[in-house]
Image (cartoon, grey):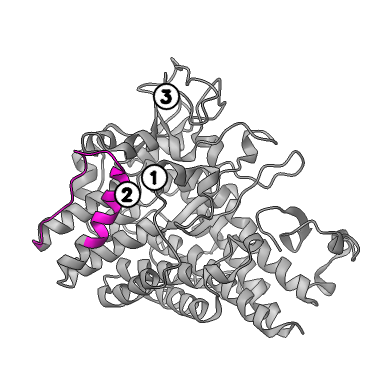
Amino acid sequence: MNINKITIIVLLAIAFTSCSEDFLEKTSPGNLAADNFFKTEEHAVWGTNAVYEHLRAWEVHVFSFIGMTDIISDDADKGSTVNDASFLKEIDDFTFDASNIAPATVWSGYYRGIYRANVALENIPSIDMDENLKARLLGECKFLRAYFYFNLVRWFGDLPLITAPLEASEFEQQRVPASDIYALIKQDLTDAINQLPLKSKYPSQELGRATKGAAQGLLAKVHLTLQEIGEAETLLLAVIQSEEYALMPDYQKIFTAEGENAEESLFEVQTAAFDQGIVGSQYNEVQGVRGTPNLGWGFNRPSDDLIAAYELGDPRREATVLYPGEVLPDGSDIVQDNPNIVNERYNQKAWVPEHAGGNRNGPGNIRLLRYADVLLMAAEVLNENGKPDQALIHLNAIRERARGNRNGILPPVSTTNQTELRERIWKERRIELAMEQHRWFDLIRTGRAANLMQGVGKAFVSGKHELFPIPQTEIDLSAGNIKQNPGY
């Protein structure tokens, strides 16, 4: 079943499947219900696909997600017009509280994803089907559940831990320590590593599904977040030594259709634009050029501080930032100046050309984990583990790819001083992964958020803003079982 080309059916939660003649000859999806679902192998695939489908949801990877990863950081400002989306301005300025809709949006969205994964994980084991496929699907669902929980725990800290569909009597949940959430994430990803195939073992029409390498890379990031450096090193070197992945030669092509699911991709959200059916994402629209020719919303403006961070001549700036007067990446037009936007510029990595279904049906895959990230994490942990020479190999591979055939720019890094090299690796992460929603999590895990946010004039409060507030609606609905984070 190809998860790139899909039609949507309604079933318990929204599930999707490929449009094959084989499928059309079977029972109509409209006749499916709780009492006749999760009975066949096809149902197991559809139930798993329903978890993937949720990755494209507004509540998961669109407006609030961008606000709580890029806009909150020093990489981006709110963008758009001055009075548009005041809740994102509060995020940008650190004036938000528990009533801000961004935390409430991702809280509900990510827990819906966890619910879908839990439904599939509870029901697929009892289906009489191919055991290898069953194991793979369970591994995919565990990978996705771990991903949902990983973002939530990094945003909110202690969380309600839900591993099965709840009965009505179980709706009032308490938060458990973040360590318990991380324990589940580690177990889910370890299981996924053992159950999922390598990327090269999937047929081309299945690319986009979770793989062993994706689970290893994500688990390495979990360990790095927890400062478990040795465990992270083992996993990252396993990904590198698998030879399943490589850097694309041209950095700018990573973020085009040509770069989707290519050699640099460990995991990305799959989207598509068709004349009928909305199976794309609004991720592209909210960051697109505001006004003719792109008709996007203009949010997530690359910041002055990010622009200043690029080394002279670094071509990654051109691939990341789209200015008025610049030719669009597909050469179709020129970005027109919008006088209502101050210091106008756009996130070029989110840009997509004209497509079927309108802007809300954006066809640009959302890159969640790519090989450059793996190499930079490997450089970081190797340096921390006293192996600077090995760290430099991976760091300089990133710079060499960015340099291309342009002599005189981005010279190789040579320092083996641990402190100096750490700073160079962190800076390279910022530049290489700019506007890809990694910066905030990097700042929090490395303890640099307060200093850098205050340095760019943001009202960051230590001991408070490392976490977002638990949505007030959730506290109210829990009858007091859920307690608020400090400072809110």
* Disc 2 target residue: 401
Amino acid identity at mark 2: Arg
* Disc 1 target residue: 251
Is residue 97 visible from the viewing direction of this image?
A: no
Say which of 430 and 299 sits in front.
430
Q: Are marks 2 and 1 in contact (CB under 8 Å)?
A: yes
Mark 3: few/some/many CA within 10 Å (<14, 14-19, 20+): few
**Residue at position x 50%, y 27% in the image:** 289
Q: Quadrant of the N terminus?
A: bottom right
Q: Secondary structure under badge 3?
A: loop
| Distance between mark 3 and mark 2 Cα atoms | 38 Å
**Magenta highlight on residue 396:** yes
**Residue at position x 65%, y 54% in the image:** 4
Q: Is residue 393 above or below residue 123?
A: above
Counting from the top left corner in percent of width and height, residue 54 is at: 62, 56
Horizontally, residue 334 falls left or right of residue 54, namely: left
**Residue at position x 42%, y 18% in the image:** 325
Magenta residues?
A: 393-417
| Distance between mark 2 and mark 1 Cα atoms | 7 Å
Counting from the top left corner in percent of width and height, residue 190 is at: 46, 79
Say which of 367 and 67 sits in front.
367
Is residue 8 visible from the viewing direction of this image?
A: yes
Horizontally, residue 328 falls left or right of residue 308, namely: right
Counting from the top left corner in percent of width and height, residue 214 is at: 47, 67
Say which of 469 and 61 sits in front.
61
**Residue at position x 40%, y 71% in the image:** 219
Amino acid identity at mark 1: Tyr
* Disc 3 target residue: 82
Amino acid identity at mark 3: Val
Q: Secondary structure under badge 2?
A: helix
